[in-house]
Amino acid sequence: MFITFEGPEGSGKTTQIPLLADFLRSRGHEVLTTREPGGTPIGDQIRAILSDLGNTAMHPRAEILLFLASRAQLVEQVIRPHLAGGGVVLCDRYADSTLAYQGYGHGVDLGVLQNLLLFATGGVFPHLTFLLDLDVEAGLKRRAQGGDWNRLDAYALEFHRRVRRGYHQLAKKEPERWVVIDASQPPERVQAAIRQSLAERLPFLTGG
């Protein structure tokens, strides 16, 4: 079972994923957590390039291809083998981030991106996606306070607003896959909402 977490910057994905992983492990599941970009030695090197605040001249097409390269490596080295073994994968960002950030954010044609995503993922797409939704100003404030500021965080506020709107458009197109969670709540309430949605959508994962 492949579950992804999406959301604007500072939405709390890195807090919620380990909590859910521990819960699912307590139910007897083999759970792997990973992130994008990164998750492999090659992917982590790509992540460093993408995050570097000094790389201000990076063209959106170059940015897309770097993300896709990291994703292709992650799928073949980590995600696909774990799924093949019957495990659960929880991933911090995946293909929908490309559509939200590069598509809705930068204005790259969504059809072009979807074709590239099919190639990069080898057809491996999530069964369920949680959108941790948060006002962009609040999210960026969280990021700044956390001291984990990167090149993507530094984009203009309107860019981040387009990304958030894009996420909502994606969720509306596939309501059977997406679950929108209010990430402005305290972390424990966000986790409770995630587990409740999981029990409703995929009850076999949460049973004792």
Image (spheres, helix red, strand yellow):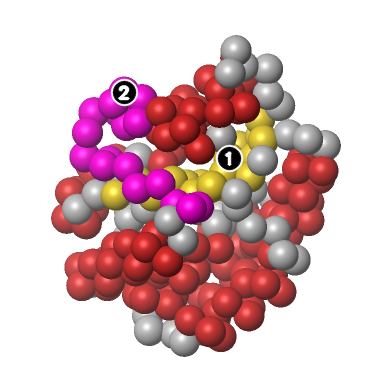
| Residue 98, percent from left and from top | 49, 69
Question: In this image, 66 relative to 157: left or right?
Answer: right
Q: Is residue 78 visible?
A: no
Which type of secondary structure does the marked residue at label 2 adopt?
A: helix
**Location of the C terminus (image quadrant):** top right
Label 1 is placed on what type of residue?
Leu
- Which numbered tag is attached to residue 188? 2
In the rendered view, would you say 41 is above or below 54? above
Residue 37: quarter of image: bottom right
Question: In this image, 172 relative to 60: left or right?
Answer: left
> Where does label 1 land, which residue?
90
Magenta part of the chain: 176-193
| Residue 41, percent from left and from top | 70, 51
Question: In this image, 48 relative to 14: left or right?
Answer: right
Between 132 and 101, the residue placed more toward the observer is: 132
Residue drawn at 35 percent across, 31 percent down:
193
Residue drawn at 43 percent across, 56 percent down:
175
Question: In this image, 62 relative to 178: left or right?
Answer: right
Whole-angstrom CA distance, mark 1 to mark 2, is 18 Å
Residue 172 inside the magenta-drawn segment: no
Residue drawn at 60 percent across, 62 percent down:
46
Q: Dot 2, how many residues are within 10 Å of its Cα: few (below 14), some (14-19), or many (20+)?
A: few
| Residue 144, percent from left and from top | 24, 48
Q: Is residue 43 visible?
A: yes
Between 10 and 104, the residue placed more toward the observer is: 104
In the rendered view, would you say 160 is above or below 84? below
